[in-house]
Image (cartoon, rainbow, N blue to C red):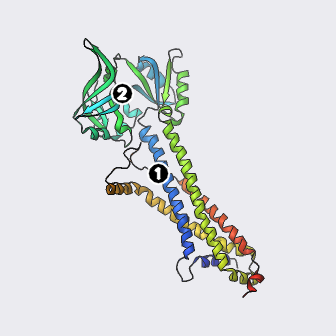
Amino acid sequence: MSSLPIYLGYKYFRSKKGAFASFTSIMAIAGLALGVAALVIVLSVMNGFERELQTRVLGVVPQLIIRNEDPISQYDELISELLQSPEVQAASPYIETQGLMSANNRARGVFVTGIIPQLEDDISILPNYIYAGSLDDLSPTEGVVIGGWLSRYLGITVGDDITIMTTNLRSSLLGSFPRSLSLKVVGIFELKAELDQSLVLIHHDLASNLLNLSSESTQGIRVKTTDLFEANSIGYQLLEDYLPQDEGYYFTSWQRTHGTLFQAIQLEKKLISLMLFLIITVAAFNILSTLVMTVKTKEREIAILKTMGCSNSQLTGIFVTLGMIIGILGIIIGLVLGLIITPNIDSMIHVAESLMSRTLMDSYFINYFPYEFRSSQLIQISLSCIVLSLLFSYFPASKAAKLNPVTILRHE
């Protein structure tokens, strides 16, 4: 009798006509599978966005910038001092200003950033994403590196000339005019992020000349930290322990410039997870309704089993087994669907774009669907669904065990 609950649970799962499963069981499995697949897909995509924000975007955006109200002179000595901190991986001088880039009768507002190309490998991932030209071709007098989106928008490529007009004024006998540069494109990068539209790199010495700074001065010092999420606390520590206290130094971090985006992704992931978990809960109600219907149709068999000596725990086990078969199959199918569909979302988007003859992702911060599967999340989803299946199976199963065989068989 020990195997009776499993045998009868599986028997009730099967269709009377010999099919794999009854119609109600298939509907319950399908509802749960769709809910699990949706949760896997959405969480994996949100994980991907979170990862891309940390790598592609925050790998290029300065994690920490040490600034001063006045230009920072003798910055080499200050960088050497900052590198003494165990929380600092790399540091380099950094200049940023706004400008208007134009070519082929088109123009675009950009952030002109002055860097030292030889130090960029240590502090940024951008050199790994240059697909045309080279960052090393930037010189103190010539060269500019731009994003792929911007190059396509302006219709230019490596070797073409562009004009950058900045907000810095140049005075002459005729008055004050914005300073402008005519530079040759020496490199194009592709991050597949918003930075492709606005980030422009020139040599640090050229940028300092553009802002009328001396050759040994800079606007700020860019710092790469050992812990991305402790940038603010590391900044305070650097101000206190490694920088002069009375010279007006302060810092800005990515948490102030891009932190709201990261927090928004975190909040959206939690809210969407809650919403989809509620959908899974509703789908799990199908298990309850399926078992209630099964108990109702099997009342006569339940009464016969009880008169033959079947215990209440065995009767409960029959219908719990039925509910768990439905739940486990729904979970497995949902996980498989999620693991198959998620890597192919980009292909589905491309098909939709070709059918609609328009782009759907270019206006977003990241113009593709990244994804990342996390085993802990998959295990958590599976365990949660198993618990729900067990809960929704137990109540109708316990009702079946309490049926009175005399009342049922009296009318037979």
Crowdedness of circle 1 by 10 Å Cα count: few (<14), some, many (20+)? many
Left or right? Give the position of 338 relative to 290. Answer: left
Find disc 2 in the rendering and name its residue: 98
**Hey, which residue is sitting farthest top in the picture?**
173
Q: According to the image, label 1 marks what residue?
A: 45
Given residues 50 and 149, the one toward you in this image is 149
Residue 187 placement (x, y as % from top left): 28, 36
Residue 240 located left or right of residue 162? right
Which three-letter amino acid code belongs to the residue tagged 1? Answer: Val
* Residue at 50%, 36% in the rendered image: 259
In terms of sequence position, does the residue under pointer 2 or pointer 1 come before the other?
Answer: 1
Q: Which mark is residue 224?
A: none
Q: What residue type is labelled 2?
A: Gln
Q: Quadrant of residue 123?
A: top left
* Marks 2/1: CA–CA distance: 33 Å
Give the image quarter of residue 98: top left
Vertical placement of residue 349 versus 147, above or below: below
From the top left corner, tell me how far across and down residue 408 is, in percent: 74, 82
Q: Find residue 359 and report its horizontal and vertical position in percent.
A: 34, 49
Q: Can residue 316 be seen in this view?
A: yes
Outermost residue toward the bottom in this view: 412
Query: Is 357 or 307 nearer to us in this picture?
Result: 357
Of the 4 image quadrants, the one containing the C terminus is bottom right
Looking at the rendered structure, the secondary structure element under dot 1 is helix
**Residue at figure coordinates x 27%, y 24% from the top left:** 180
